[in-house]
Image (cartoon, rainbow, N blue to C red):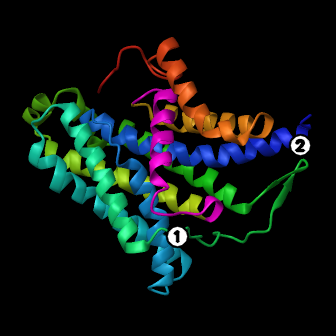
Amino acid sequence: MATASDLLQYVISGATLGSTYGLAGLGFTVIFNTTEIINFAQGEFVMLGGVLAVFAIRWGGLPLPAAVLLAIALTTMVGVAVDRLTIRPVRGRSVIALIIITIGVSIVLRGTAMLLFGKDTYALPPFSGGEPLSVLGASMVPQSLWVGGITLATLIAMKLYFDRTISGKAMLACACDRKAASLMGINVDTMVTLSFGFSALMGALGGTILAPITLTSYDVGILLGLKGFAACILGGLGNPFGAVAGGVILGVLESLSAGLISSGYKDAVAFIILLALLVVRPAGLFGRRSAERV
């Protein structure tokens, strides 16, 4: 039978991994709030963040902070390029067509990463040492504190951005009514490109903070992207707080199921929860039944 310290260990591990799901979910939220598109290349942005940071150290000999910043910057540029090269030329198409295009982008990015970086698994050094910390009988690596702190700071920044800034409100207005937003002087194309850049930035950030804990490779984005999407739906699609909260809840439930039942069921938990929630509460735990746009 699991002890209290065992349960705490599961919660800590799950919350750490779930925070990364939440960052991926934030990326989904930013693009959805602007375009109402579900970007299924989001997982590849997470992958690129971790892999590019590793190879910035290996190939460029950069120190860890510089490698992380470079990886985030390069991934953000990839996000902007995705919009400019694949989404903008077909912007008048249906939402379903644009979602299918993002799936194609995901496949291309994953294949390119495999050709450039190989199929091996890589580790990124921890940000502040790897000596575990003791917490009420459970252990926690210092990287978990980085994950939680960066995720919380990103959530607060994005919440303030959407609620308090003109460009944030403009991004929301583009999703509500693109033609009306354009008539009010909002450059819709710029807002959409900005949303893709922000989405890629948050994905890359999640990849760099998670890589020291779970390692990284060219194909890690598939599952991380799906888990991020599940976190988005769980918390309420379009709700930044809900995306992060949904990710943490999902990560904790996965960890508890792996520890108390079997690790073989861990990955299935996310999708079982997603299916059940879509039946019981389609708007998500923190979503509204009718979307309110600014």
| Residue 23 x/y as whole percent | 49, 47
**Looking at the image, can residue 233 be seen?**
yes
Q: How many marks?
A: 2
Q: Is residue 108 shown in magenta?
A: no
| Relative to 200, 34 lies left or right | left
Residue 64 vs residue 46: left or right?
A: right
Q: Which of 28 and 170 is in front in this view?
A: 28
Q: Which of the 4 quarters of the picture holds residue 183? A: top left
Q: In the rendered structure, which amino acid carries the disc numbered 1?
A: Asp
* Viewer-nearest residue: 23 or 268: 268
Image quadrant where one finds the N terminus: top right
Q: Residue 120 carries which label?
A: 1
Chief SS of the magenta region: helix
Which quadrant: the C terminus? top left
User: Which image quarter: residue 128?
Assistant: bottom right
Q: Is mark 2 on a helix, strand or loop?
A: helix
* Neighbour tally class for label 2: few under 14, some 14-19, many 20 plus, Cα within 10 Å: some
User: Mark 2 belongs to which amino acid?
Assistant: Ser
Q: Nearer the viewer, residue 165 or 24?
A: 24
- Which residue is at 14% across, 48% downward? 88
The residue under the point 65% across, 60% down is 213
Find numbered disc 1 in the image and state the secondary structure of the residue it sits on: loop
Q: Earlier in the sequence, mark 2 or mark 1?
A: 2
| Residue position marked by numbered label 2 in the rendering | 5
Say whether residue 235 is magenta: yes
Relative placement, left or right, of 75 versus 82 is right
Q: Indicate whether 110 appears above or below 128.
A: above
Q: Give the range drawn in magenta.
A: 212-237
Q: Which residue is drawn at 29% across and 57% down?
A: 108
